[in-house]
Amino acid sequence: MKLNPMIYLLGSALLFSASLRAGEIETEILVIVGPEGHAPGTHEVAAGGRLMAHCFNHAENVDEIRATVFYRWPQDRAVVESADTIVFIGDQFPGARLEDSARVMRDLDELTNRGCGIVCIHYATGLAAQDVNPDGDHPLLHWTGGYFATRCNHHQSVARIFEATVTPSVPADHPTGRGWAEFKVRDEPYTRNWFGKDGLADGAFALASVQFPPDNPQREVVAWAIERDDGGRGAGITMPHFFRNWERTELRRFILNTILWTAGREVPTDGVETTLPELETFEPVSVDPQPRSKK
């Protein structure tokens, strides 16, 4: 069964409001889908948002949790204030690209001050030159621990598709690393990401790394996290570029573990378990990469 995005949005909102009144949910995850313009089969941010929400709403070993997808910043203040963590997916950080971004950033500042989590997936980790101060400072640096510097004046990260070996960079007992081990994937994990002029700040740490470039391999952090002074947690994961890679159990579990951790929930010993339906269920433009259409 396929999901019509508008029906999915309406149904999710009604379900959200009903159970918010009933007080049945322990943990609220808001999945915010931002604008995107990549070729079909790549990014597919709306379908990716629906997929992440589905995984949490049908998790096999995590209960009392709800993930709701929004294609714009929620207008209902009660919805915003209910969030335990917010997951962003889009082309560049949606907080800087959504309509009324100034309001979104104010809301995020309030939410993080009271300990709400934030996770950015793939290009949602990205900021452009007009978004940041000349020295590279930006709230995302403090909320998640780093970002992908998209054509920034102070720094230039690297986006390249290659056969990557993704290696956990946290201690074996860290919750985000449960249930997955080193794996290989052809994707576009961003490298030379920006963590501040002195590298990872206090409270920030690497979650996963790769060796890049292939001809002169060096360790590059492609996923990171932070435990903030406000008590909240944030993270950035620079995959997946290809929608098909959501099928990869290791990558999907890593992402779901990290989101759950930022929400302040205990991650199961073997990681978040889900049974994923066919990728077409989430209505991407294309499951596999296709050429960009000519306009």
Image: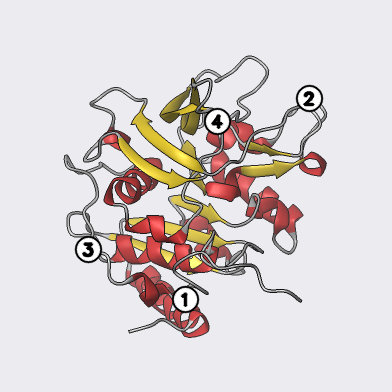
Left or right: residue 261 compared with residue 199: left
Q: Amino acid at mark 1?
A: Ala
Give the CA distance from mark 1 to mark 4.
Answer: 31 Å
Q: Amino acid at mark 4?
A: Gly
Q: Residues within 10 Å of mark 1 (few under 14, many from 20)?
A: some
Q: Residues within 10 Å of mark 2 (few under 14, many from 20)?
A: few
Question: Which is more toward the observer, 88 or 223?
Answer: 223
Left or right: residue 162 compared with residue 261: right
Give the CA distance from mark 1 to mark 3.
Answer: 24 Å
Across and down, in percent, residue 193 comes to 60, 31
Quadrant where the N terminus sits is: bottom left
N-term mark: 2 or 4: 2
Residue at the far front: name it. Answer: 215
N-term mark: 3 or 2: 2
Residue, disc 2: 135
Residue, disc 4: 145
For label 1, the SS is helix
Give the CA distance from mark 3 to mark 2.
Answer: 44 Å
Quadrant where the C terminus sits is: bottom right
Q: Which image quadrant for residue 291?
A: bottom right
Residue, disc 1: 13
Q: Residues within 10 Å of mark 4 (few under 14, many from 20)?
A: many
Q: Are marks 2 and 4 in contact (CB under 8 Å)?
A: no
Q: Amino acid at mark 2?
A: Asp
Q: Amino acid at mark 3?
A: Thr
Across and down, in percent, residue 215 comes to 53, 24
